[in-house]
Amino acid sequence: MLFKLEIPELAKHFMVVAMDMRAQGKSTDTSLEHLTYRKFAEDVKALADTLKLRKINILGWSDGGNTGLEFAIKYPKNLKKLITSGANVFPDGVGKQEVENMMRDAARMKAENKPEREIRLLQLMIDEPQITKEQLNNIKAKVLVLAGDSDLIERVHTEYIAKEIPKSKLKIFKDTSHGVPIEKADELNQDVIQFIQK
């Protein structure tokens, strides 16, 4: 489970709702269309509506961070604050070579008749997200942008995200990869608690 090191501590301070995005973890997906982070954001909104939560904070890692950014863009009135770790706003945020590697992997998986679910998730990372500078400039919520200093997401890309969101704060974790929630759980917990409670 993602955030297994964070949920117990954060639950002492906040109501925590942990969800897996469609086609990931314990969530199912019966649709056949392409996956998008905007659809994931719509799923988050649907869950919040079902739980009668009008305005929420979001902590998202990697795909969850991308989803949080899409939520901030599409549902500004429903977001208090966003914490995003290891997010990107266009595919090349991971570097052109990594995107080319994913494209080769997707072609190989199709040729080997791998499960469609696995191919769709990889295709999502090849095609998405496609968030523009203007969309970032228009995010109204306060956003804490996080990454590791050895993150899969290129540092210049993470810095670009933080620079373009008006009310953002940037933190780069030292000696950390893309796995900030695993490698720096205690520090992340304190950052999240302080950021939300401010």
Image (spheres, helix red, strand yellow):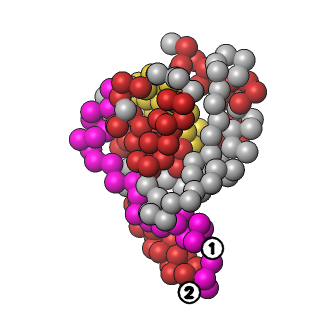
Image coordinates of residue 89 in percent, x first then y, are 39, 49
Residue 62 appears in the picture as rendered: no
* Disc 2 residue crowd, few under 14, some 14–19, many 20+, Cα 10 Å: few
Report whether 135 appears left or right of 92: left
Instruction: Decide: is 140 above or below 93.
Output: above
Quarter holding residue 76? top left
Q: Mark 2 or mark 1, which is nearer to you?
A: 1
Instruction: Decide: is 180 above or below 198.
Output: below
Image coordinates of residue 155 in percent, x first then y, are 46, 48
Check residue 136 for magenta coloring.
yes
Q: Magenta stretch: give its range.
A: 112-140
Instruction: Decide: is 69 above or below 115.
Output: above
- Name the residue beneath numbered marker 2: 111
Image coordinates of residue 103 in percent, x first then y, are 47, 75
Q: How many marks?
A: 2
Looking at the image, which residue is at 41% across and 58% down?
128
Image coordinates of residue 50 in percent, x first then y, are 54, 30
Check residue 31 for magenta coloring.
no
Instruction: Decide: is 129 above or below 190.
Output: below
* 162 and 18: which is toward the camera: 18
Which numbered tag is attached to residue 115?
Answer: 1
Q: Amino acid at mark 2?
A: Ala
* 63 and 154: which is toward the camera: 63
Q: Amino acid at mark 1?
A: Pro
Quarter holding residue 188? top right
